[in-house]
Image (cartoon, rainbow, N blue to C red):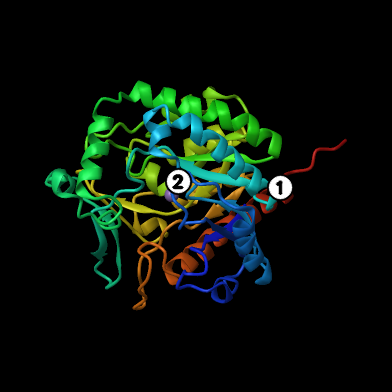
Amino acid sequence: MKMIFRWHGPKDPISLQYIRQIPGLYGIVSSLYDLPLGEVWPGERIQVLTGAAAAHGLRMEVVDSFRVHEEIKLGRPGREKLMPQYISTLKNLAASGIKVVCYNFMPVFDWTRTQMEFPLSDGSNTLSFEAERVEQLDVSKGIPLPGWGTRYTPEKLQALLDEYASVTTEQMWSNLEYFLSQLVPVAEELGLKLALHADDPPRPVFGLPRIIKNIDDHRRVLDIVDSTANGLTLCSGTLGSDLRNDVPSFINEFAARKRVHFVHLRNVKVGENGDFYESAHLTQCGSLDMAEIVKALHDADFQGYARPDHGRMIWGETGVPGYGLYDRALGIMYLQGLWEGIGKEKTRALAQRPRVAA
Ligand SMILES: [Mn+2]
């Protein structure tokens, strides 16, 4: 398992000087967050990021926020002009030493939360999701949700939602199929691995079609193109926010097939009504058994990349919600502790096995 840390580029309030001080860190995952959707990522710009990482003794072999244009997700004719641009980006990524490309196929919104500073009893705060707050929104007035207030004007947003209103989940699947059938062969040739992240949270939001929610959906994705280049980012916090998803069984099945290239490891505390908040990583702080999740990865001899995903804001830190330094660094130490403990336990068990005479 190669532990990496998300860095938002030179504008990130957390410097690479600080990130490199996290023990055991392999590297960073980043993106060209400022580029317009669908535009080709220039090689030189990717190399500014990989170069900055290297200058701090870190590697950058994974990108995220490889955002898929709405024309593609909607299956509109405009996608034909866009696909060559995505292919060019893949070529530039491979030429810059990138190995894994994390993307998602969620319509209009990426992750959805209803509070960015949900207060916890210990005085820290975190991201949370309450279904009732979503249902009460009048979308025609724009969406005052954190992170989304400024991305679209209310008119543009309404127009997009109207377009999706006529798109069925089966159409979304065939749009994903089109996207993968074009990109997977290219990725394969370039030695790149595509890694799809589930819809976050894995349930319909604002009536939009959401297709990557459970284990059957993940199986279906892998069946679209049978290639290791068509892989997954398994996000424990996303999948685990629906308690019907048993995260270790996702790992057992898909990591054994060598289709998991990236894992996001974090815990969530899910209430009886399905609302949730992002808790500290420790098993006892949330609803997920993090030791079982890490053990499943260890059992699968997982060699891919992992990140602590999000963290709470603690010790007075402010910054990009979910992406503070302190709590994610604590998460990394805990996850590495689990990994080391599980490995040592296995070595000890092997050594104590009674020897059979030859
Ligand atoms: Mn995630």
Say which residue appears at 25% left-offset and 44% top-offset.
156
Amino acid identity at mark 2: Cys
Quadrant in the picture for the C terminus: top right
**Cα gap from disc 2 to disc 1, whole angstroms:** 31 Å
Task: Please tell me which of labels 2 and 1 falls first in the chain.
Answer: 2
The residue depicted at 45 percent of the width and 46 percent of the height is 235
Q: Which residue is mark 1?
A: 350
Q: Nearer the viewer, residue 31 or 226?
A: 31
Respond yes or no on whether mark 2 lies under 8 Å from ligand 1: yes
The answer to whether residue 34 of the structure is visible from this angle is yes
Question: In the structure shown, which secondary structural element does the residue marked by tag 1 occupy?
Answer: helix
Residue sitting farthest toward the bottom: 316
Q: Nearer the viewer, mark 2 or mark 1?
A: 2
Q: Residue at 52%, 55% (x, y): give it.
A: 31
Left or right: residue 223 compared with residue 242: right
Question: In this view of the protein, can residue 300 be seen by the observer?
Answer: no
Q: Position of residue 54 (x, y in %)?
A: 68, 66
Establish if 8 lies above or below 104. Answer: below
Mark 2 is surrounded, within 10 Å at the Cα level, by few (under 14), some (14 to 19) or many (20 or more) other residues, namely many
Label for residue 235?
2
Left/right of residue 110 with respect to residue 347 in the rendered view? left
Q: Quadrant of residue 225?
A: top right
Q: Residue 79: horizontal and vertical position, in percent?
A: 45, 31
Badge 2 vs badge 1, beta-carbon distance below 8 Å:
no
Position of residue 104 measured from the top left corner of the image (x, y, whole percent):
44, 41
Q: As rendered, which of 352 and 221 lies closer to the eye?
A: 221
Residue farthest to the right? 358
Dot label at residue 76: none
